[in-house]
Image (cartoon, rainbow, N blue to C red):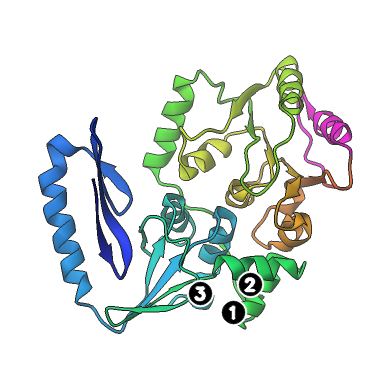
Amino acid sequence: MQREVHLFGLPIIRVKKTELCEKRYFLGIQYKVKKYAQRYDSFAEAFAANVRGVHDRRIRVIVNNTGEAVTYARTHALWYKPDELVFGSRPQHADIFRMFAPQIPVFYCGNAAELNEPQSIDGNCVEPLLTGPQLIALNNQGKPFLQSWAEHMQVDVSPLSYSRAAISSEVERSALIKAQALRLNLDNFVFLSPAARSCEALPTAFWDEIETSLRAKGHDVFYNSTLFSIPEAYALASHARAIIALRSGLCDVLCDLPIPQFIIYSYNKFHGDLQPMYSFEHFPWATREFIREYNVFKQDVNIIQEDILAHTSTKGIHKTKN
């Protein structure tokens, strides 16, 4: 059995029952059934009922990937109006806005990926900030994403200033406790992120060789995992000696850290080469002097690996640029 309660047509309460268990979610957050079910059900139903009476609101829904959501949060001054409500279709969207635009509350509404055009629901305009097809069309132009986004919004981004991520002391403490539980040497480790939805994976042997070499040089190694939330990953990465990653949305989150970062572009199923659109050369908030970018379309994987290892040493990580 499955039950859902919708707010402005978006799922905010979801109950899933099977023969073995019952799971309940409110705004995408799972809560324990035995202890909190009645309390949460009562509050959630009242929340939805009270807000459902609101009319003439503009509801913005983020349906895109992590990297694009970072750009939306960074450029919120261009599109956000104080009377709007913002929903994220993925849990990390709310985390991203808490980091880069904490003044804008973002509710997690569950999967809304099929929202590809504005809809009028309960007297409110519900619309995706940028639909999936629109995103693909913009990137097919081959222009830097920030430029395409500004042209789509018909605005000038040059006057904007961009702040670094804001991480709470609670998030920092949680990240370090988890890292200590993994016995990570917080004084000397390299942050590896080999997974990406946007790029084709590199051979496991590529990362194995990098790890072996780094450990031989005296560095500890951390592989990013779902054990850490996006804010926690940011907090932990801020302590790293270097970041080595396949190009992903997490790279957009971490790119303002003043830490040597080695970013690798591989094949993308929609566009082939993503670097023309998503190179950090085009993002003014990135610490570009710390970032080296590699591209499997232009460089042999073994050459990329050799260059990364050449810029990591027992004496420290070289902070040289391309």
Q: Is residue 146 visible?
A: no
Up-down relation of residue 158 to residue 289 (above or below) = below
First to last magenta residue range: 300-320
Examine the image and state in which quarter residue 294 appears. top right
Left or right: 199 with respect to 223? Answer: right
Q: Position of residue 270 (x, y in %)?
A: 70, 57
Left or right: 109 with respect to 167? Answer: left
Left or right: 118 with respect to 2? Answer: right
What residue is pinned by disc 1?
A: 153
Label 1: few (<14), some (14–19) or many (≥20) C-alpha neighbours in 10 Å: few
The structure residue drawn at horizontal position 47% and vertical position 54%, both measured from the top left corner, is: 96
Q: CA distance from mark 1 to mark 2?
A: 6 Å
Three-letter amino acid code at the position of disc 3: Ala
Up-down relation of residue 310 to residue 149 (above or below) = above
The structure residue drawn at horizontal position 42% and vertical position 61%, both measured from the top left corner, is: 112
In the rendered structure, find residue 149 and report the number of the disc placed on it.
2
Cβ atoms under marks 2 and 3 closer than 8 Å: no
Q: Nearer the viewer, mark 2 or mark 3?
A: 2
| Residue 303 is a magenta residue | yes
Q: Position of residue 272 (x, y in %)?
A: 77, 54
Up-down relation of residue 85 to residue 228 (above or below) = below
Identify the element where label 2 is drawn. helix
Q: Position of residue 57 (x, y in %)?
A: 32, 80
Cβ atoms under marks 1 and 2 closer than 8 Å: yes
Three-letter amino acid code at the position of disc 1: Met
Cβ atoms under marks 3 and 1 closer than 8 Å: no
In the rendered structure, find residue 77 and report the number of the disc placed on it.
3
Examine the image and state in which quarter residue 46 appears. bottom left
Q: Nearer the viewer, mark 3 or mark 1?
A: 1
Three-letter amino acid code at the position of disc 2: Trp
